[in-house]
Structures are given as structure tokens and as C-alpha cells.
Amino acid sequence: MTEAADLVILGARVRTLDPSGPRASAIASCDGQIIAVGDDHAVAELRGPQTEVIDGRGRVVVPGLVDAHSHPLWGARAMRDAD
């Protein structure tokens, strides 16, 4: 067995955006990095005694999009004010 996951999500509907395997049901992560995506049985094997396990209850999990851009007018206005 490889290192134990910090977090495991089981029973979800995972959209991988990988054409060779577009769907999965489970994800495991360790130190903030995804270490496995697959079916519940395979990913559950990565659990350890300290692993947080989340029941996905059929909810959809999709890859995140981080968008870091600014529109000039809105960006200038935002910089005038305090957060």
C-alpha cells in the first residue's frame, strides 16, 4: 500500500475531464494533492486510521477552475476601496 490518504470522498459522481475515463465515484487526496481517482473499492483501500472519509451521497464533483484576471475598469475601482 502507498501512503494513506488524508481525505477520501466515496459514493460521488466525479467528472474527471479525462476522455479515457470521464467518470469515477471516488477521490483520495494527501497533503492537498489528489492521489487517486477511481471506483469506491480501489480508493477506499487508501484509507488510514486518520483519514477523513466523506460520503459523497451521489453528489457531483468537478475539477475546479481558478481564474485570476481583472477587468481594467472594475479592477481600478476595486483598488480604490478597502477590503
Image (tube, rainbow, N blue to C red):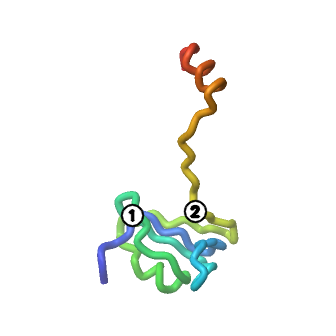
Give the secondary structure at mark 2. Answer: loop
Q: Indicate left or right for 58 with 63 as reference.
A: right
Give the secondary structure at mark 1. Answer: loop
- Using the image as rendered, state which of residue 35 and residue 67 is in the foreground: 67
- Using the image as rendered, state which of residue 64 and residue 8 is in the foreground: 64
- Using the image as rendered, state which of residue 2 and residue 79 is in the foreground: 79
What residue lies at 55% left-to-right and 65% top-to-bottom? 54
Expressed as whole percent of the image width and height from the top left, the position of residue 19 reads 60, 81
Is 1 rendered above or below residue 67? below
Name the amino acid, label 1.
Asp
Q: Which numbered circle lies on residue 63?
A: 2
Residue annotated with mark 1: 6
What residue lies at 30% left-to-right and 74% top-to-bottom? 3
Expressed as whole percent of the image width and height from the top left, the position of residue 61 reads 62, 65
Is 12 rendered above or below residue 69? below
What residue lies at 47% left-to-right and 79% top-to-bottom? 44
Q: Quadrant of the C terminus?
A: top right
